Image (spheres, rainbow, N blue to C red):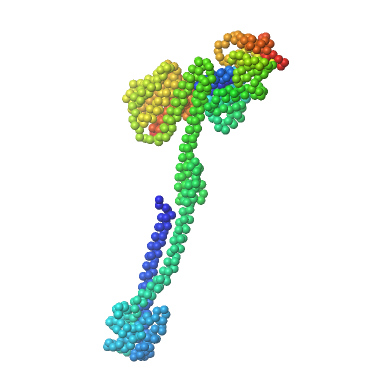
Amino acid sequence: MRILIVEDDAVLRDGLSVGLGLAGFTADAVETCAAADAALRSSEFDAVVLDLMLPDGSGLDILKGLRLRQQDIPVLLLTARDGVDDRIAGLDSGADDYLGKPFDLDEVAARLRALLRRAAGRASAVLEWQGLVLDPSRLEAEKDRQPLNLSRREFAILHVLMSHPGQIVSKSRLEDKLYGWQAEIESNAVEVHIHNLRAKIGPGVIQTVRGVGYRIAGEA
Amino acid sequence: MASIRGRLITILIISTGVVWLFATAWIFFSTRAEVERVLDARLMEAGRMVSSLITSREIESRRPMDLTAQLTARSRASYDRQLSCQIWSLNGDLVGLSESAPSERLTASDTGFSQTEINGETWRVYAVVNADVGVRVLVGDRLKVRNHLVNDVIRGLLLPMFLILPLLAGLIWLSVKRGLSPLNRIAHDLERRHAADLSPMPAVETAQEIAPVVQSLNGLFGRVAGLRDRERNFTAFAAHELRTPLAGLKTQAQVALASNDGAIRDQALRQIVVGVDRTGRLVRQLLDISSVEARERSDHHGVVEAGKVLRALAGELSDAARGVTVAVAPDLDDLQLAIEPELFTLAARNLIENAVNHSPPGGAVFCHAERSAGSDSIVIDDDGPGIPEEELPRVTERFFRGRNKAAVGSGLGLAIAELALGRSGWRLSLRNRPGGGLTAMIAAAPPSHG
């Protein structure tokens, strides 16, 4: 799941990127309103972690712009101002959740997972598909009650595919979700991960739609 | 603590008492004079009456007893036997006397008024000579009786006044109490007021004399409330500003705890060190700004040797890691400025720090003097990105961080510099250099400014 972090404090931005990466997210970070706007227009993110006070404007403006463009991706506001009025203003501007600084990294991750789950229309924290069970909060997976030993990337691919069973996900989209703006990706990296995944969960679960992408097999 | 009420009551009672005593004395003396005049007139009249009765033979000079009876019957009011009468022949024999009269001759004088001491009593006597019959009539009364009469009259006057006196005191007390009630009300209001309540006092029902006090109090309340709000805003702002670096520290610490990867952990710990440095600097600047703010603006400045201070700061603030150097021009060496040394150092430190932080790696910060007729200025040039023109008016606001902010900036440096200079009669002016970079100038404030 790919997250955009908008935060102007360098130490916090770095901490969030690395920390959310450890929690299984793919995190890209920007520092200003302008950069955030550009990123949201050009790339696809699953959620945004947004600071309110930015050097070139307010995070609320980004939020309003997003909603004006009918982009309904979940937004989690992070801010030093967490009075009731500030919370109300944030939520009324279209934010999905609100966390006051200083926050707990694990809580940020948990709230993001909840936002993503809700955005996907699921109530359960665990994804299930034909004997395959994925627990994003613990980065654990099992098949027919047998634990699977997946790498972070493999888990991420399975997470993306199982979020929308039957739906075809292109290779470039998978790359985006896995690596974000990380520069040097091997051109066959996704194929390698898919290959390894198939070896672990058995053949026939992940289907290759030639020339289009991948999907989880099933009567979708 | 002297009470206004006590003082008023004392003043009123003393002055009323003095007036009252004076009036009493006046009444006493004027009444006595009047009574004496009336009694003297009576003596005279009685003397002449006796004399004329003798002439018309209605009184036999040989039957003095009748005389007494007739005379005393006329004046028998509350004072029995006031008058005494003696009739002497012109050759010195006592012809007759009234019942209350002493047998000694009442006066030695031949005619008119006189006073005599007889048997320890003072008599007032009127003598009249009846030449036709050849007798002298002496009529007198005792001064003791006269004084008794005067005292009775005075007593009659004074008694009601003595009864009125406590009533008067009570009225004074009530009036003073009532007159001072607006003051009491204000004192009561103030006493009941909560320490945090700085709202203005209601102006209704305030006496004209107290209105200025209430106005001044309200003015004071306003100023204190303003100060309190500024401090509260500042504290709130400072607390908010500290939350972001704290969030960064906590996040990095949690990353370090959560990661099994040594490289990630090391990186997180390095970030924590950076974060602590920045937070420490932010705290130091917050303390600086509140200590500068607490100072009163003053016109008594010390003298600063600008070159010496700037050179010391240059050595301290040059950033060797990024290759940013701070140079101080020789023309600053003999420059002396009339400015509080502590404030100048604070301003210069923040300006140089700001310049260094915004300089690119390998950049240079240059401090030099700009001398013009009348006043000298100090200029600090850097070759950083400068400040976008539209942000220039706002960069000295607290916590303002523009687009070209430095990685370690708190948004307080320029605010501190401006505040410190303003407190000592100087000002900060910022402008972009034509070739890029920022010029910060410490210049004398225009005279109108202070």
Q: Quick check: can you spot residue A104?
A: yes
Image height of B229 relative to B407, above or below: below
Judged from this view, the residue extending furthest toward the right is: A219
Judged from this view, the residue extending furthest toward the front is: A146
- Residue A180 location (% of width, % of height): 58, 16
User: Which one is in front, A213 or B115?
Assistant: A213
Give the residue drawn at x 46%, y 25%.
B279
Image mark count: 0
- Residue B334 location (% of width, % of height): 32, 25
Image height of B439 relative to B296, above or below: above
Give the residue drawn at x 38%, y 75%.
B149
Image height of B40 relative to B264, above or below: below
Give the residue drawn at x 37%, y 82%.
B46
State the quadrant of the C terminus of chain A.
top right
Image height of B238 relative to A151, above or below: below
- Residue B66 location (% of width, % of height): 38, 88
Give the residue drawn at x 49%, y 25%.
B245
- Residue B71 location (% of width, % of height): 38, 84
Q: Quick check: can you spot residue A168?
A: no
User: Which one is in front, A18 or B6?
Assistant: A18
Q: Is residue A163 left or right of residue A6?
A: right
State the quadrant of the N terminus of chain A.
top right
